[in-house]
Image (cartoon, coloured by chain):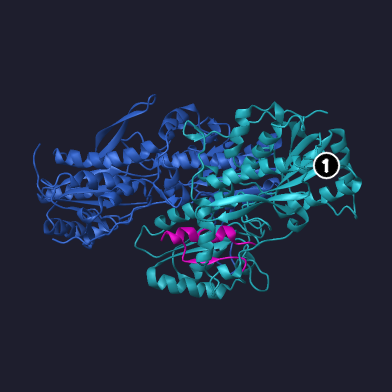
Chain colours: A cyan, B blue
């Protein structure tokens, strides 16, 4: 072990998940165990922005019980950010400022938790620090419900969102066939370029209580073909459930709201860019004459810690803790990845993925996991996803409601 | 006990809930214990409609384990219906047909599960059977997430929906304050005339993680005043969460989509009657310039058995079973009501409420439980609602997903 003594900072970046705080807990709790090497552990407010502005918290001041509760607290307890660093070769202002802050607070360990963009940020900072000759170990911790990170079997955040989507879809399936009248239900899931979340509704279908049609952004969307699919199933059963990704688009690159809702205007004459579900629901109502309901899972799908996956919480925590251990071991410039050793029984191990490989690379649902028609996923997806949602995370409660963490957020000092 | 020997039929009516099948299980399991008095127990497909059409199932043919699973299966396992019986004095066609079916199948016990309209149906049938001199015991079993039934402290279905809404609101609260930019979130809850469900989001506020503003249909809605409220809070904190009932309307009787979205048209020139949340979100975006997100809890709030309240499941089952016991005891023409004996500890008992008192009477949130300004509820509501969500129902699972009941639905024969 090549020993490096200095403080650590951790930041959260991009859209939050049910378990992003579990990764934070993993970093903090592990780092706080090593006060010989890491005297102080900081948590940045709103990711990189908090570091640039010197707004970060001394995590050693927090109640250890509250740090534990972070494991099951959704959203981003420190605050997140969508901040794209310029290329250092074009504009190194931010980088110089970061270096200044790192020096001022003797920060020698930098952990960043996020998706593609955040790993890009992490990579750029790592490279700049190396070039500047400032010794600092930089490690990425994966996070995204979108599940589109390269180099990892799956991303912390995805399994819980998948569990929520599959469960809620089963419940809606039952609700949508209560009356003996026709009914079409459109479920809108997140995912601009990758269809992992939408595909997760197929787990409900695997249980016999799921969608009839699944449309992912991986396959060019054909509106007429979809109407045809819907009409065919409707004629057979009178009930159709469609799961659609917010990101599906035609081969010309048009999103659904652009295709069918673009001229909708409100009372003020402003364009009403409705969500995919409501726009598609109105369109199908028009085309089929059936009762149609659009349901957007919206933020609910990414913050539903009450329905978290146990392995997800453990892996989110574990990858945070692993990042600290590896950094202390001398590693830098890597993201922690999850490698699946076995699906039955479900076993994983952590691996190191070079940050430069991860940055800005997107992993989508393989075409061969999608049926030929492009309107459902096949067994390969089920085999992949089912082990991820097998067990429930246990959420501490008080008065029958979640007991989420309360942080003191004591401003760090030099 | 005045003994009456004959078969029993049970039907589900109106919008489903998380626990409507628990009431069905209560009726079926209890009735099946009394084969001396009740040789056959039928379940009507789609409520009264199934009886008129002689489509009903022999529940004695079901696997007892599946009947048990009905307790935690949301939605309406037999199928529900919205069917309004005419007044018998105006048109007795349906009533005569019901009598014919009752005679044909020797039905002497009629149990009907639903809300206001369904209790009206139940009452009318009861009165007609009495007038016809056909001995039949008629009992109503309460059900509605809307919680607006007269003569009962609360309605089976409400507590689970309240637990779901409060929990999800807490999660959205955290998600909606992730970035250091302004954000307004509009949460739309069900309830056309009664604000109980929307008020349930105040339970999240009680935990410090809930809405800033709550608008119920019980108070005339003032759009300008709401914008003023929102702007004031936004100026202070940059984050506003509004919970609004789909049923709020101005003193002139206009609903929000009518107020602000009525001229919205889609690509086909058709009116887009958006949901309250999305319409209000667009309006507030216009008025404040802030980022605004509308979230409609939609069907999710009434079918989320995965987040059921233990007491709700027990009371739904219990009121079904109680209806059978009381009918066997000779009672008829009543709905089972829930009387709260104590809030701490939470204790209830079943009471008999005359059907004619319940039919078409609506119980709304008392004005004195709402603050003077009409934009929040006070402690009286919290004291009422908190005990209802105290414990979690345990949902049987398989592969990490709910294991809902599977009924054989064997058509009944004479």
Q: Tell me the magenta residue range.
A: A194-218
Compared across the picture, whether A134 is left or right of B145 comes to right
Where residue B33 appears, as percent x and y from the top left, is 17, 44
Where residue A325 appears, as percent x and y from the top left, is 70, 40
User: How many numbered discs sit on the rendered protein?
Assistant: 1
Q: Nearer the viewer, residue A172 or B236?
A: A172
Q: Which quadrant holds the C terminus of chain B?
A: bottom left
At 81% across and 34% down in the image, what residue appears? A6
Q: Which quadrant holds the N terminus of chain B?
A: top left
At 60% across and 44% down in the image, what residue appears? A19
Can you see residue B30?
A: yes
Q: Which residue is mark 1?
A: A136
Is A210 within the magenta? yes
Q: Nearer the viewer, residue A73 or B43?
A: A73
Q: Residues within 10 Å of mark 1 (few under 14, many from 20)?
A: many
Q: Nearer the viewer, residue A215 or A149?
A: A149
Chain letter behind tag 1: A
Compared across the picture, whether B333 is left or right of B358 comes to left
Give the image quarter of residue A236. Answer: bottom left
Where residue B270 appears, as percent x and y from the top left, is 55, 66
Give the image quarter of residue A111. Answer: top right
Can you see residue B259?
A: no
Q: Nearer the viewer, residue A407 or A300?
A: A407
Is B91 within the magenta? no
Q: What secondary structure is marked by label 1?
A: loop
Q: Which residue is farthest front?
A: A1
Where residue B275 appears, as percent x and y from the top left, is 53, 53
Compared across the picture, whether B336 is left or right of A108 comes to left
């Amino acid at each position: 072990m090549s020993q490096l003594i200095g403080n650590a900072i951790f930041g959260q970046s991009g859209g939050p998940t049910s378990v992003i705080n579990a990764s934070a807990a993993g970093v903090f709790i592990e780092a706080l165990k090593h006060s010989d090497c890491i005297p102080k552990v900081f948590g940045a407010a709103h990711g990189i922005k908090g570091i640039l502005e010197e707004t970060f918290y001394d995590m050693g001041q927090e109640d250890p019980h509250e740090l534990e509760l972070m494991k099951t607290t959704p959203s981003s307890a420190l605050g997140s950010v969508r901040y794209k660093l310029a290329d250092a070769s074009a504009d190194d202002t931010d980088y110089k400022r970061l270096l200044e802050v790192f020096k001022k607070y003797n920060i020698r360990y930098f952990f960043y938790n996020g998706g593609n963009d955040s790993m890009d940020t992490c990579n750029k900072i790592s490279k700049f620090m190396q070039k500047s000759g400032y010794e600092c170990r930089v490690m990425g911790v994966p996070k995204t419900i979108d599940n589109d990170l390269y180099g990892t079997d799956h991303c912390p955040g995805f399994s819980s969102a998948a569990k929520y989507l599959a469960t809620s879809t089963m419940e809606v399936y039952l609700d949508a066939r209560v009356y003996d009248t026709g009914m079409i239900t459109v479920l809108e899931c997140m995912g601009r370029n990758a269809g992992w979340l939408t595909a997760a509704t197929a787990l409900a279908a695997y249980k016999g209580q799921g969608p009839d049609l699944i449309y992912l952004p991986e396959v060019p969307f054909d509106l007429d073909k979809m109407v045809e699919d819907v009409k065919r199933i409707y004629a057979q059963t009178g009930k159709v459930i469609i799961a659609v990704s917010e990101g599906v688009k035609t081969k010309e690159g048009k999103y659904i709201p652009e295709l069918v809702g673009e001229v909708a205007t409100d009372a003020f004459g402003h364009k009403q860019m409705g969500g995919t579900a409501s726009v598609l629901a109105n369109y199908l109502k028009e085309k089929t004459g059936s009762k149609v309901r659009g349901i957007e899972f919206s933020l609910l799908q990414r913050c539903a810690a009450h329905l978290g996956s146990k392995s997800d919480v453990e892996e989110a925590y574990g990858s945070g803790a692993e990042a600290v251990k590896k950094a202390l071991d001398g590693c830098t410039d890597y993201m922690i990845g999850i490698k699946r050793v076995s699906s039955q029984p479900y076993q994983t191990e952590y691996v190191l993925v070079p940050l430069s490989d991860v940055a800005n690379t997107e992993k989508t649902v393989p075409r061969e996991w999608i049926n030929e028609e492009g309107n459902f996923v096949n067994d390969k997806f089920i085999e992949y996803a089912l082990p991820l949602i097998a067990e429930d995370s246990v959420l501490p409660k008080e008065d029958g409601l979640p007991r989420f963490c309360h942080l003191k957020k004591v401003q760090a000092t030099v």
